[in-house]
Amino acid sequence: SQKIEQNSEALNIQEGKTATLTCNYTNYSPAYLQWYRQDPGRGPVFLLLIRENEKEKRKERLKVTFDTTLKQSLFHITASQPADSATYLCALDTGGGADGLTFGKGTHLIIQP
Amino acid sequence: DAGVIQSPRHEVTEMGQEVTLRCKPISGHDYLFWYRQTMMRGLELLIYFNNNVPIDDSGMPEDRFSAKMPNASFSTLKIQPSEPRDSAVYFCASSLVKGIMNTEAFFGQGTRLTVV
């Protein structure tokens, strides 16, 4: 069956270090992958989109990689700050490019000052 | 634009009652999605519309759930009758398709539904 896996355990990182979150998927061949941030009591907010023919995407302190052979995406936050503490969700298209996104359950990131 | 607007923010209802959740998407967006989020199952896609037409409702859990989009600026998700296991946060999202690739989804603040 199709599955998206993110580390369900909270990730604790010291301020200033690089936080790396993992998204693994099976039985999908997504055309693109997206990362979202969700704060408590709020809806997810889009961060980055990476297409299947792109290896890496950057936006300010954020970097996303996409390895279609390993079926894995890594999400990096460099020079992390306490304000980066949130739950981060990866999402894949499930076919056709215009379908609804399928989300992982998210990883809770805690940046400790 | 004010973003995707959902109402109500919170809803507490008794089992067996009808519940209607409302959503106003971002103006000009082609797609509208309804998601449900729980701790156990995460964020699940229930149904989505393209240009007001339902495209895929395979995520709707039961016939008790129904969704409509009478025009480009309004959608409803109705649960009748409601059950305690329907308790969750329901999100509406909209997006704009560019070419064959979907762009990012913009989510509303969600409706926290509690069925007692």
Image: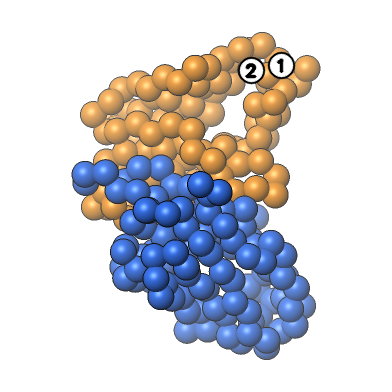
Chain colours: A orange, B blue
What residue appears at the point 66 percent right and 41 percent down from the top-left corner? A39
Q: Quadrant of the N terminus of chain A?
A: bottom left
What residue appears at the point 76 percent right and 21 percent down from the top-left corner? A112
The mark closer to the camera, 2 or 1, is 2
The image shows residue B81 at horizontal and vertical percentages of: 61, 87
| Image-based side of A49 in relation to B1, left or right | left
Residue B89 in view, yes or no:
yes
- Provide the secondary structure element on which disc 2 rests: loop
- Provide the secondary structure element on which disc 1 rests: strand
| Disc 1 residue type (three-letter) | Gln
Query: First in sequence: mark 2 or mark 1?
Result: 1
What residue appears at the point 65 percent right and 73 percent down from the top-left corner? B85
Indicate whether B62 appears above or below B56. Answer: below
Q: Chain of mark 2?
A: A
- Residue B36, quarter of the rendered image: bottom right
Indicate whether A62 appears above or below B87. Answer: above
| Disc 2 residue type (three-letter) | Ser
Residue B45 in view, yes or no:
no
Are there few (<14), some (14-19), or many (20+) residues within 10 Å of tag 2? Answer: many
Q: Quadrant of the C terminus of chain A?
A: top right
Between residues A10 and B80, which one lies in front from this camera angle? B80
Between residues A77 and B23, which one lies in front from this camera angle? B23
What residue appears at the point 31 percent right and 22 percent down from the top-left corner? A55
- Residue for badge 1: A14
Q: Chain of mark 1?
A: A
| Image-based side of A14 in relation to A107, left or right | right
- Residue for badge 2: A80
Judge if badges 2 and 1 mark residues of a common chain: yes
